[in-house]
Image: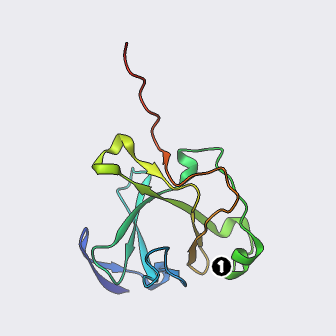
């Protein structure tokens, strides 16, 4: 166990076996290598990817299949090898969420660059899907039609 200071959660203890390791960091956060996944709450489809070295750095994520059941992509051989993934069951997939101006109805998720985690080794990488029809800002909740 390791004790970690966070801005959002205060001091927390993280099991060393649950530390998610990004060998190359995340895009724009290349110096951040160790994170913990912390559930928003028991009933929520959201989790936080909390940095273990920067107390105020946490990303909101979700399992994209909860909102987009048809979401699919292939992980290329180089990324499978880098992450040490041998079978489909060893993978957790998340996508990062943006909340523009704090407006929950306008939340979007980045389907173009999923976070892929090998659940056996806890090695992870945000993979940018080349030649994909997905974009970085897919709305989680459809826009409401204006009442006439």
Along the viewing direction, whichever of 114 and 85 lies nearer the viewer: 114
**Which residue in the structure is indicated by mark 1?**
83
Q: Quadrant of the N terminus?
A: bottom left
Judged left or right of residue 145, residue 131 is right
Colour scheme of the picture: rainbow
* Depth order, front residue of 132/88: 132
Q: Is residue 129 above or below residue 141?
A: below
User: At x 37% / y 72%, what residue is drawn?
Assistant: 50
Relative image position of residue 135 (x, y in whole percent)? 57, 52
Please say if 111 is above or below 125.
Answer: above
Determine the secondary structure under disc 1. Answer: helix
Q: Position of residue 128 (x, y in %)?
A: 61, 66
Q: Residue at x 36, y 81 (%)?
A: 52
Residue 43 percent location from the top left of the image: 39, 50
**In the figure, 26 relative to 69: above or below?**
below
The furthest residue to the right: 77
Crowd tier of the residue under label 1, counting other residues whose Cα lies within 10 Å: few below 14, some 14–19, many 20 or above: many
Q: Position of residue 131 (x, y in %)?
A: 70, 58
Specify the quadrant that holds the C terminus: top left
């Amino acid at each position: 166990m390791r004790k970690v200071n966070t801005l959002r959660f205060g001091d927390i203890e993280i099991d060393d076996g649950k530390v998610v390791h990004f060998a190359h960091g995340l895009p724009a956060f290349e110096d951040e290598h160790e994170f913990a996944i912390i559930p928003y709450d028991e009933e929520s489809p959201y989790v936080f990817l909390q940095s273990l070295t920067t107390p105020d750095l946490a990303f909101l994520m979700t399992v994209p299949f909860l909102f987009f059941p048809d979401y699919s992509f292939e992980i290329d051989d180089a990324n499978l090898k880098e992450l040490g993934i041998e079978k489909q069951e060893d993978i957790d997939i998340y996508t990062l969420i943006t909340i523009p101006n704090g407006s929950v109805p306008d939340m979007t998720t980045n389907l173009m660059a999923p976070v892929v985690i090998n659940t056996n080794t806890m090695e992870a990488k945000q993979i940018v899907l080349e030649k994909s029809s997905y974009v970085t800002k897919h709305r989680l909740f459809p826009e409401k039609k204006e009442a006439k």
